[in-house]
Image (cartoon, rainbow, N blue to C red):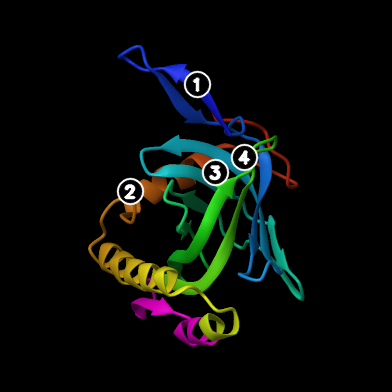
Amino acid sequence: MTAEQTNNDGVAASVPRRPAIGTRLSARWRKWDGSPHWVNDGVYLGRDQWGDWIGQPVGWGSSRPGASFLAEGPNVTLFPPSGDHAVTINRDHPRQMRIYIDIAWDIQWSDSEPYEPTGIDMDLDVVRADDGRGIWIDDRDEWDEHRVRYGYPLDIVEKLEALAVDLERRVTAREAPFDDATGDHWLDRLVAMRLTDGESTGAPA
């Protein structure tokens, strides 16, 4: 759902409804067949020219059927308006994964409070690891298996394969928002919130 505000030309423009900064929420993922996938707990950080940012402090959880873990380092996730990928940027990751991009489909924000993002996980990932492994497209085997099992439409297959290649190029080139400065800005905002015991304390001063 969107709200309306007036732009500089006096024309009503649609503005997406989002939570207040500091609001706790969950990003909810599913697979193509509708089965539940990861649920990531986080806090809404704000919005910039790249999209909406959610932070996950140390100790906050992610879970899916049969698995769960707590964040060992702070991380932030960017949800661009394109709705076809989500970019997680880590700090102090135990395996030095700096950037982890989930290729996705139909990422949308709920139209009622708490305005949480939901989307379809589409298997492919673009990863940047700072331990010498470099940058690569991950989970191609899962992609090949699921495109047959779930019957992904050909136009979506072609679009997302091209997207993964383009994102790998952009991550390699350190183009914003895949440069360190952009992610560190939002990581610093998350850390400044000083969240403890899984509770939001609101925006930093």
Q: Residue furthest top?
A: 10
Q: Secondary structure at mark 1?
A: strand
**Residue 45 in the image, given as x and y percentages of width and height:** 54, 39
Residue labelled with disc 3: 191
Q: Are marks 4 and 3 in contact (CB under 8 Å)?
A: yes
Q: Earlier in the sequence, mark 1 or mark 2?
A: 1
Q: CA distance from mark 4 to mark 3?
A: 6 Å
Residue 128: tell me if it is visible: no
Residue labelled with disc 4: 194
Residue 143 falls inside the magenta stretch: yes
Q: Secondary structure at mark 4?
A: loop
- Per the rendering, the mark at residue 181 is 2
Query: Residue 202's image quarter?
Result: top right
Amino acid type for the residue under numbered disc 3? Val
- Per the rendering, the mark at residue 4 is 1
Q: CA distance from mark 2 to mark 3?
A: 15 Å
Amino acid type for the residue under numbered disc 2? Ala
Q: Secondary structure at mark 2?
A: helix
Q: Are marks 4 and 1 in contact (CB under 8 Å)?
A: no
Q: Are marks 2 and 3 in contact (CB under 8 Å)?
A: no
Circle 4 crowding by C-alpha within 10 Å: few under 14, some 14–19, many from 20: some
Front disc: 2 or 3:
2
Instruction: Give the residue at x 64% y 42%.
Output: 110
Q: Earlier in the sequence, mark 4 or mark 1?
A: 1
Q: Earlier in the sequence, mark 3 or mark 1?
A: 1
